[in-house]
Image: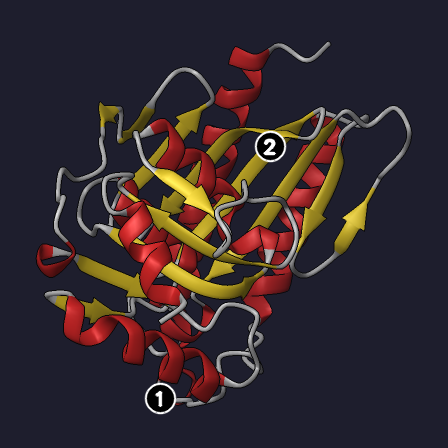
């Protein structure tokens, strides 16, 4: 049985080291790379694969009986004995990274027997490491965080992203139509992991998206729930590690967000 404390410490150190590598790569980008414009779904960077391979190598060397699911490599080392599964996005916010925008993160979560138990979001250019362990709360740089106390939709800041939808028009025509004139502001950071971290830390009151991939949001789910928030599908069902529509909130606004999605 893997020691949970050691596992969390290892994951923190691993994400911090990967973040250091990303900072170096970010600072060394050429001007041509910085100015590149591509579809968010088409964007693939060399760093996506190099950081992915580095993380997989170190996890497998330390925990050879753990399975690993990443955006770049898919599902690896999955056996009947794999009660532990890592879910990883090596760079969540690749377009931001390429455009020299510091809003990108490494997203790492660990499932134990199918339950999300650990979530880590490393935002290296922002100097922040968000950590959540099931039953032990959520922190940023070691300091406890909580969701906001906003209770009225008209006072809410809402975040969103494209999720797994290829038709971006469908996403934002639906979300903006249903929410934009009901809240203070409707924003997009360009990183699902950071958008979840913003909800968990009370910087935003809700995050809504469609057909999100598990590596984009798994760590954020643990973070939000451990910070006192709520994460469900549009139908109010518990989130599962597969492509599903997601509403994440401070809990107080959850029903209001759910009601609006169907208007």
Q: Closer to us: mark 2 or mark 1?
A: 2
Q: Residue at x 71, y 47 (%)?
A: 69
Q: Residue at x 24, y 61 (%)?
A: 158
Mark toward the start of the polypeptide (2 vs 1): 1
**Which image quadrant is residue 72 in?**
bottom right
Note whether 13 is above or below 160 in the view shown.
above
User: Which percent across, then down, holds residue 83?
Assistant: 77, 24
Note whether 29 is above or below 81 in the view shown.
below
User: Which percent across, then down, holds residue 211?
Assistant: 57, 65
Question: Is residue 177 left or right of 153 when viewed as pictured?
Answer: right
Report the front residue among 19 and 4.
Answer: 4
As measured in the structure, the alpha-carbon distance from the residue carrying label 2 to the one carrying label 1 is 35 Å
Question: Is residue 219 left or right of 85 when viewed as pictured?
Answer: left
Note whether 193 is above or below 211 in the view shown.
above
- What sort of colour scheme is used for the picture? secondary structure
- Helix, strand or loop at mark 1: loop
| Location of the N terminus (image quadrant) | top right
User: Which percent across, then down, holds residue 143?
Assistant: 21, 25
Report the front residue among 234 and 171.
Answer: 234
Q: Which residue is mark 2?
A: 110
Note whether 2 is above or below 152 in the view shown.
above
- Helix, strand or loop at mark 2: strand
């Amino acid at each position: 049985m893997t020691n949970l404390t050691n596992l969390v410490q290892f994951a923190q150190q691993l994400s911090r080291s990967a973040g250091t590598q990303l900072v170096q790569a970010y600072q060394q980008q050429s001007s041509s790379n910085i100015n590149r414009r591509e579809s968010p779904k088409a964007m693939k960077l060399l760093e996506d694969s190099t950081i992915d391979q580095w993380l997989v190598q170190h996890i497998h060397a330390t925990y050879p009986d753990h399975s690993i699911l990443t955006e770049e490599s898919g599902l690896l080392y999955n056996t009947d004995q794999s009660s532990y599964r890592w879910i990883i996005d090596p760079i969540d916010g690749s377009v931001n990274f390429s455009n020299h925008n510091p809003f990108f993160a490494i997203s790492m979560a660990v499932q134990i027997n199918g339950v999300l138990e650990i979530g880590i979001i490393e935002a290296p250019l922002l100097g922040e490491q968000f950590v959540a362990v099931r039953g032990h709360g959520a922190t940023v740089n070691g300091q406890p965080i909580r969701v906001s106390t906003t209770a009225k939709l008209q006072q809410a800041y809402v975040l969103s992203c494209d999720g797994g939808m290829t038709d971006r028009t469908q996403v934002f025509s639906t979300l903006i139509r249903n929410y934009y004139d009901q809240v203070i502001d409707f924003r997009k950071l360009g990183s699902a992991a950071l958008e979840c971290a913003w909800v968990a830390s009370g910087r935003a009151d809700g995050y809504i998206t469609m057909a999100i991939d598990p590596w984009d949001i798994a760590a954020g789910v643990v973070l939000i729930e451990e910070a006192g928030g709520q994460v469900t599908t549009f139908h109010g069902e518990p989130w599962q590690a597969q492509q599903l529509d997601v509403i994440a909130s401070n809990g107080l606004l959850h029903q209001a967000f759910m009601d609006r999605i169907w208007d």
